[in-house]
Image (spheres, rainbow, N blue to C red):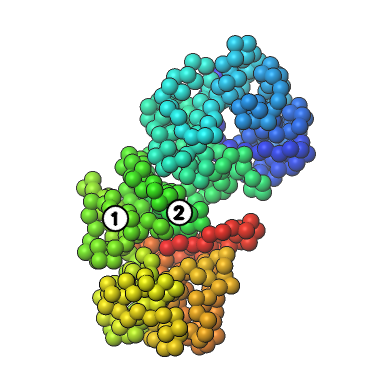
Amino acid sequence: MTLRAPLPKICIALGLPDASRLLEHARREADNGERFLEFRLDYLPRPEDGLPVIRKFLELHPGATLLATCRRHQNHGRFNGSVEEQFRILGAAVDAGARAVDVEIESAEMPLAPMHLLEGKAHIILSYHNYEGTPALDPLMKRMLRVPASAYKIVTTARKPSDNLRVLSLARSYPKTPLILLAMTEMGFPTRVLCTVFGGVYTYAAPSLTEGTASGQVMARVLRNLYRVDRAWKSPRLYGVIADPVRHSISPAVHNRALQARRVEGLYLPFLVSPLQLKDFFVLAEKLPLAGFSVTIPHKHRIMRYLDSSDPLTKRIGAVNTVYRKAGRWRGTNTDADGILIPLRKRIRLAKASVLIAGNGGTARSAAFTLKDAGAKLAITGRNIDRVRALAKLVDAEALTMEQAEARLFDVLIHATPVGMWPHTENCLFRGAIPASVVFDLVYTPQETLLLKRAAAEGRQVICGLEMFLEQAARQFEIFTGETAPRAAMERAACEALREQEEQLRLHGGKHGGTL
């Protein structure tokens, strides 16, 4: 059966152990506007109990499309019956109204598999899942194409960034074959967006109130509103952010809103890249291809060895937060300078101002070199006095212990450590009085840190880290696209993302805060 009528671009995967809850959650998704749902019948103790749920649901929502799945235990499902029983249940699901069924290649290949129970009656999605890694895919495709089906689903596990490329490349190798191409885990998240962008039939999303059925699934509204997977893309320019962790970065929300505001045909994606995977990431970046990407913890320094060039200030700083491609070459720069200078210059004259920088990482280095060039008189402090002294020597600054710093009063304090970042919001680097008249905390989750609360209570002028984030992001956007950054739209997106992120972290006990 061919896919004459296209399926919707987002399928909500529902796997629940109780028939009444399955119906309840399916109805909730349909009431929220979702029209394509997968019923994992194998999650039910008796898969047959899902058949009346299909009938009842379609009576209430006749315009919905249902995909029935009854994956066997041997193939990482929960159904312990035989292949014959599996096909009997799927056939009954079609009779109950399911428009499509998912059949694992392992079941379809069985010598006596009763494929005739399904052929010509429903869309057959022939599927392959690998929960260990991403194997050689061309032999796998040849194996799968031996079995006639409406579409072919390849789901692997991403262990390194380039696994995303290997999976998505099948769309280019088999342009006339209906495919669903996905890689599980957070590292494989880009495939959940790019599957449909690269011509895939549809992608999967998690339901709104329960966990998804596979690692890396996100809610449909994120795929639809943030990444616009259900629109018809032609050849979008691709951007992203690389970090570890990357899950809680608000950069995708901010940059995608900016791309929409300026009507740029582009997408901005999060890429989870571990410290030892930078070289592999560039394989993905080169061939996907990416037009540019943001760089944050822990890659700002190490990434420089993989670039073709970087500007003089960036070389002096020794840290990159922005990479872009020009004339086929990877170039690096650091927009943290804008993020630090612009908010400060609105409030104080920096020439000869006394500035205390707390921290010694990539962002602290950016602040030190930037403010030194602006004519400020610098002092640096932190918990690791050896690293403090090393950075102070580079910029001809005064190295202070925490006790020495707290005994003085500066014009400006730049806080560039993760202390006070969500979820450890009860922490503050300084124990006594805040030693500056203007306090700029580069942490932005939460927006009002304990440091800023205490500084405000002491009558200090405070600057939230979100100002720094937005200024450096605006400069990145202009480098990436050549367009003027829509600052108001970016600020709204950032505030919305932070509110939602903090709410989710409260509900689910998240571990990571925002990163610059």
Q: Position of residue 266 (x, y in %)?
A: 38, 48
State the mark number for residue 332.
none
What amino acid is at disc 1? Met
Image quarter (top left, top right, bottom left or bottom right) of the C terminus: bottom left
Q: Are marks 2 and 1 in contact (CB under 8 Å)?
A: no
Q: Which residue is mark 1?
A: 304
* Residue at 54% across, 30% down: 129
Q: Position of residue 395 (x, y in %)?
A: 27, 75
Q: Position of residue 492 (x, y in %)?
A: 49, 64
Measured Cα–Cα span from mark 2 to mark 1? 17 Å
| Camera-side residue of 68 and 184 | 184
Residue at disc 1, secondary structure = helix
Number of residues whose C-alpha sits closer than 10 Å to that of mark 2, classed few (under 14), some (14–19) or many (20 or more)? some
* Residue at 47% across, 39% down: 158
Q: Which residue is mark 2?
A: 244
| Camera-side residue of 165 and 474 | 165
User: Which residue is at the far top?
Assistant: 112
Q: Is residue 335 visible?
A: yes
Residue at disc 2, secondary structure = loop
Q: Earlier in the sequence, mark 2 or mark 1?
A: 2
| Camera-side residue of 248 and 403 | 403
What amino acid is at disc 2? Asp
Total numbered labels: 2
| Camera-side residue of 382 and 294 | 382
